[in-house]
Amino acid sequence: MNTKEIVDLNHAYVIDTYGKQRNLALVKGRGTRVQDADGRIYLDFLSGLAVNALGHCHPAVVDALRNQAETLIHVSNLYYIEPQVRLAEALVSHSFASKCFFCNSGAEANEAAIKLARKWGNTSGKGGRIITFRNSFHGRTLATITATGQEKFQRNFQPLVDGFSYASLNDIESVEELADGRTCAILLELVQAEGGVHVASQGFVDSLRRFCEERDLLLILDEVQTGMGRTGRLFAYEHYNLEPDIVTLAKALGGGVPIGAMLAGPKVADVLQPGDHASTFGGNPLASAAALAVLDVLTSDGFLDTAKGLSDYLLGLLGETAKHHAFIKEVRGLGMLIGIEFDWPVKRVVAGCLERGLIVGTAGENVLRLLPPLIATREDMDEAVSVLRSVLEVQKNENAQA
């Protein structure tokens, strides 16, 4: 099928909740490159919204999927599943956690964390209220859009789920003002990716951890986008010398195969009991095999160190680029989760990059978001920045003529 045929079928039969990008239909991928239905090649610096951390069709993931698909694709969680328990063991061995719960997505992982926190709070006499943050994003279910501190995601979906309130990132006093005797947990993204790529400060995180300990509150970290190497460490919390109570994962965990996970520390690992929560497909053999392959690559010797060095290189190139354009307000981020804030909406920059064969994204109206695959090379980054610079020169000339 060509692009027009795919687009026509989409308009006829698919509920379009996404707003497709310029009639782009991607049909093939390898490494950092994807190909559309008309044969054009693109450099992918969006990585399926941080899913394809190992690039497209990584050999280790493909082999794991092929081998598992020939053995056992799915059985119920009513039975023990070897790839699932091996994945849980591997995640625990590389993290703070004691046990894991598996599901299919980041929203589901956050739902599991919310249920666990509320059960813990209600059974310990505290209540089930949870503090989250303005500009956060935690998913598209009713509970997770309520947890999300952005009204645009909640509009027209009332009544929302009760029991959430919103503090301000990097403002510990705003947290302290909201906490009361009914509060059981605080839910935080260490980098607010969808909300504009805002990074939590070390001082704020230190204060938040102390506050949770003083008030006996659970600290839940949403690492759906920051986890699995995106920031240069396996988990973003490692940058902060922090031990949370719960961490949620998805996106890059399966290398493109849907899987989410909730990691629970020793304080709460046994709160959820049979009948409290479930997921039909969560951690099934196929998805768990893919995630094991991803984790093996990410934790191999030198992999994350190399990726961190390349992210520093990319940030340096972008910083130099920003010096030549007054309309760039800031380049910020952590590892290969990067935001470039402009004085004006960045849709035209995204479109200009796409025309030149570079896929990038947004994080709000005025923030360009870059999420390169962790396997990207220095040459890939040089190419991406060269394309971006050419687009910015066009925008600068157009602005001067306006």
Image (cartoon, rainbow, N blue to C red):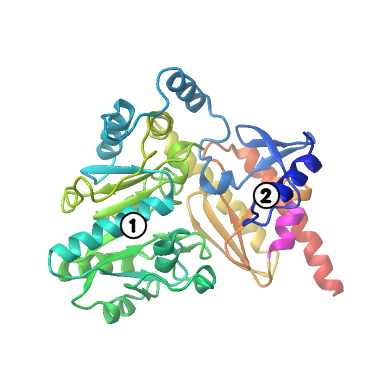
Looking at the rendering, in which quadrant would you find the C terminus?
bottom right
Near mark 2 (Cα within 10 A), the count class, few <14, some 14-19 or many ≥20, is some
* Residue displayed at 24% across by 51% down: 276
* Residue displayed at 28% across by 49% down: 277
Q: Which residues are magenta?
A: 346-353
Asked if the residues shown at circle 2 and circle 1 are in contact, with their CB atoms under 8 angstroms apart, the answer is no
Horizontal relation, residue 96 to residue 216: left or right: right
Q: Residue furthest left?
A: 124
Q: Which residue lies under the disc numbered 2?
A: 385
In the rendered image, residue 145, in percent from the top left (x then y), is placed at 45, 65
Name the kind of residue labelled 2 in the image: Val
On whether residue 352 falls in the magenta region, the answer is: yes
In the rendered image, residue 149, in percent from the top left (x then y), is placed at 44, 70
* Residue displayed at 40% across by 22% down: 72
On whether residue 379 falls in the magenta region, the answer is: no
Identify the disc placed on residue 221: 1
SS for tag 1? strand
Horizontal relation, residue 285 to residue 117: left or right: right
**Dot in front, 2 or 1:** 1
Please identify the dominant SS of the magenta region.
Answer: helix
374 or 364: which is nearer to us? 364
In the rendered image, residue 331, in percent from the top left (x then y), is placed at 57, 62
Q: Residue furthest right?
A: 401
63 or 382: which is nearer to us? 63
Q: CA distance from mark 2 to mark 1?
A: 32 Å
Residue 30, picture quadrant: top right
Q: Is residue 11 above or below residue 185?
A: above
Name the kind of residue labelled 1 in the image: Leu
Q: Is residue 261 above or below residue 132?
A: above
